Image (cartoon, rainbow, N blue to C red):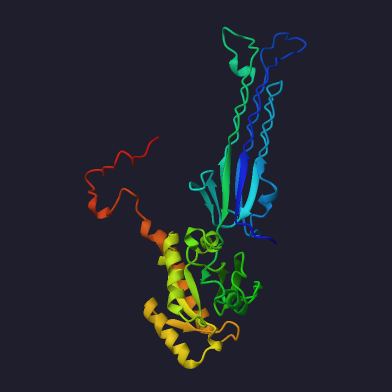
Amino acid sequence: MKFLDEAKIFLKSGDGGHGAVAFRREKYIPKGGPAGGDGGRGGHVIFEAVDDLNTLIDFRYQQHFKAERGESGMGKNRSGRHGASKIIKVPVGTQILDEDKETLLADLIEDGETIQLLTGGDGGFGNSHYKSSTNQAPRYAQKGFPGEERWVWLRLKLIADAGLVGLPNAGKSTFLAAVSAAKPKIADYPFTTLAPNLGVIAVEDGSFVLADIPGLIEGASEGRGLGDRFLGHVERTNVLLHLIDGTQEDVVDAYKTVRGELDAYGDMLADKQELVVLNKIDALDEETIQERKAALEEASGGDVFTISGAAQIGIKPVIYALWQSIQSGRQSARALPEDQETGPWVTDPDEISEDEPAELDSSEALRD
């Protein structure tokens, strides 16, 4: 299946049905009065996140989505049927942005999560609504209200627990294939990976998802290479696994290049927890391994793992370090709502006297 993570689509909710002009006609009641029913409401446009999709490729072939219009009212005060809503299914992790591609309208990150983006137009009133003491037989009804319409961008940001980053040909895809059942394309040339790959890694007490994105180059945050487009796929991760090709002469420069791009990209990518890994040690002698490991530890300010993805050397310690970081991140995320038990206008409940009510800012006061 081809991977597509951005698409522009047109949406239109249904127009409301027109009200009816009709009159009650019975054998012994020749002037029964108005009996026109109301028009039905137009259908809404609803997005639903589903787990069984992982690309926006379907939106390459269909860009226009319209909900049904409501049916017009009928005689005998019968209302028209409401138009069917248009439900658009998207992968979990899809963001919906305005046409300017900057204003975020919705972020669907849970399976089954829905949002009604456009509301259908209301149906018009039938002529029975306009009967009055001075007009017993109105011969007019209200037209249905038009639905809403707009262009939006869909942007997919994959949901993964950890993200693989590094320069092209650092061995990211080889590592992913070694630790999971994923089968990314692997070859001995840069930019072999042209789209993100996901792999599920099983550990003793659970599992986690690792995302491999195309390699970064200097200037990726400004659009060079492929990295700029795909860096968004590691925004939601708890930890970054930074792979560095140990066969490079200057491993510190390789490390700093990727760190610079993460920092320039923004969205707190550079602030994420990072595990630094020196890869391809099977091609190095022990003295070179230790020299380059020490140089990386000095540059990163932390421990550096040494592995060979191809020979599957030193992989288990990296996996368990990743798992510990992910569990820590999950626990922090679960604890966050517990820190927000009080309302936004209360900083310390003990500061409020029982004898007099707390004063609320006018912008925070509840309104009927």
Residue 71 in view (yes/no): yes
Q: Residue furthest bottom?
A: 286
Relative height, residue 246 to residue 21 (above, below): below
Relative to 309, 276 lies left or right:
left
Relative to the observer, which residue lies in front, 176 or 42?
Answer: 176
Query: Who's the residue at 55% across and 84% down the image?
Result: 308
Residue 158 placement (x, y as % from top left): 56, 61
Query: Who's the residue at 44% across and 81% down the image?
Result: 304
The total number of labels drawn is 0
Residue 111 placement (x, y as % from top left): 59, 57
Relative to 183, 288 lies left or right:
left
Q: Residue furthest front?
A: 249
Q: Residue furthest top?
A: 134
Relative to the observer, which residue lies in front, 159 or 245?
Answer: 245
Relative to 352, 271 lies left or right:
right
Relative to the observer, which residue lies in front, 174 or 66?
Answer: 174
**Location of the C terminus (image quadrant):** top left
Quadrant in which residue 366 is drawn: top left
Relative to 252, 112 lies left or right:
right
Residue 33 placement (x, y as % from top left): 67, 12
Relative height, residue 73 to residue 288 (above, below): above
Residue 321 placement (x, y as % from top left): 48, 79
Residue 114 in view (yes/no): no
Relative height, residue 293 to residue 218 (above, below): below
**Location of the N terminus (image quadrant):** bottom right
Query: Who's the residue at 66% across and 45% down the image?
Result: 63
